[in-house]
Image (cartoon, rainbow, N blue to C red):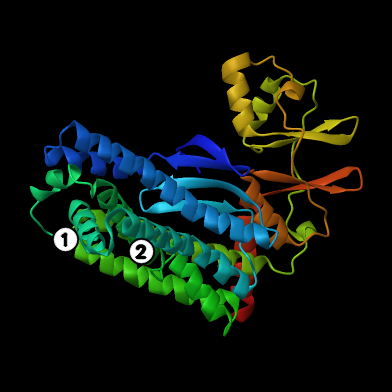
Amino acid sequence: MSGSWRIGQISGIGIYIHWTFLILLAWVGLTYFVQGSDLMDTLHGVVFVIALFAVVVLHELGHALAARRYGIPTKDITLLPIGGVARLERMPTDPGQELVVALAGPAVNVVLAALCVACVLLLAGAAGIATSLAAGMEELGFVAGDHARLPALSGLPLVGAHFLGKMVVVNVVLAAFNLLPAFPMDGGRVLRAVLAMRMNYVQATQVAASVGQAMALLFGFVGLFFNPFLVFIALFIWMGATSEASMVQMRASLHGIPVVHAMATEFRTVSPTDPIAEAARHVIAGFQHDFPVLEGGRLAGVLTKTDLLKALAEKGVDEPVGNVMQRDFERADPSEMLESVFARLQACQCHAIPVVRGDDLVGIVTMENVGEFLAIRAALTVGRAA
């Protein structure tokens, strides 16, 4: 996801933080600042933020490991202000599998909340549970209360239980929020999975997206009067629901169509010995952005626009293409279904996939020519209907 920074890796899955996650961190910091917190309370807040990071990552790992059970790898996990996104290679097509994958994240939060409650029992006893939860809810702003009492709690043996109480609240809220029936939250996928057991996948997605958009409108309306942050969440939900619906509709339109019917057959190629200036001239002329690299008539690699621009800035116009091109790349067969190739275009975040028959390069598939193919097909359908 653009605008993200890599902060680590767990079980072979890259962990990234999106710049908008800083909004959440700023909100937490501002809360402690407004309350006039001392050094101990500030350190408490830092630990809480780190714990919040961990909770969100564990939530997304729940999705990732559940998907792995069905042979679906996860490319990376990105932290966002309203949670995280586990970017799977593909979504399960079986409704039962999608239901399990969607529920795995909130299930992690439920388990974490239960573990925190058990720890509170050990630290403070049964009587301390209500106190620690109330203090956690008050500090997180879910209830109004006498904030002057909070620093006093830090000096009591209940301090550990107080922190755990906040973690119980955080996990319960994350589980409940993610189960709202709206894309891109888990609840939207749960709703679609349940609906897909009774109707086709496209119809189920459209219904789930409509529910999500209605919820976004409600959030936006309430946010205008009570909490501006809800407007931001509403926008995020609306965009997620719209994107999911359009993407599923596009995939359905590509179903059963061989790549050979949609691939571009007029394109430019370069060789490993060509200077990258040659490819740059083709880009300026408007031919294409990514270039198959042929060596001795065989496909040897792909030169992407991103790699080209980086090489121009760092190495100059005379750098050979062979030093810049990608040797590990996706390729397709002319008989492969366009739906499958389109999914791979999305998963690899590449702009072009060469189409190869045997050892011969016969075409390329890009997001642009897939879109043009669909537009022409839709126009012909309308023309025949008229």
The reply to whether residue 235 is visible in this rendering is no
Left or right of 229? Residue 287 is right
The reply to whether residue 21 is visible in this rendering is yes
Residue 6, image x, y percentages = 51, 35
How crowded pointer 1 is (Cα within 10 Å; few <14, some 14-19, many 20+) is rated as few
Name the residue carrying label 2: 177
Disc 1 on helix, strand or loop?
A: loop
Q: Residue 143 carries which label?
A: 1
Residue 251, image x, y percentages = 62, 65
> In the image, is residue 315 above or below residue 132?
above
Q: Nearer the viewer, residue 241 or 124?
A: 124
Left or right of 163? Residue 272 is right
Query: Reading the chain from its start, which is encountered first: label 2 or label 1?
Result: 1
How crowded pointer 2 is (Cα within 10 Å; few <14, some 14-19, many 20+) is rated as some
Q: Nearer the viewer, residue 281 or 98?
A: 98
> In the image, is residue 103 above or below residue 275?
below
**Residue 297 occupies which quadrant of the picture?**
top right
Separation of disc 2 and disc 1 at Cα? 17 Å
> In the image, is residue 373 above or below residue 96?
above
Looking at the image, do the residues carrying marks 2 and 1 touch, with CB atoms under 8 Å apart?
Answer: no
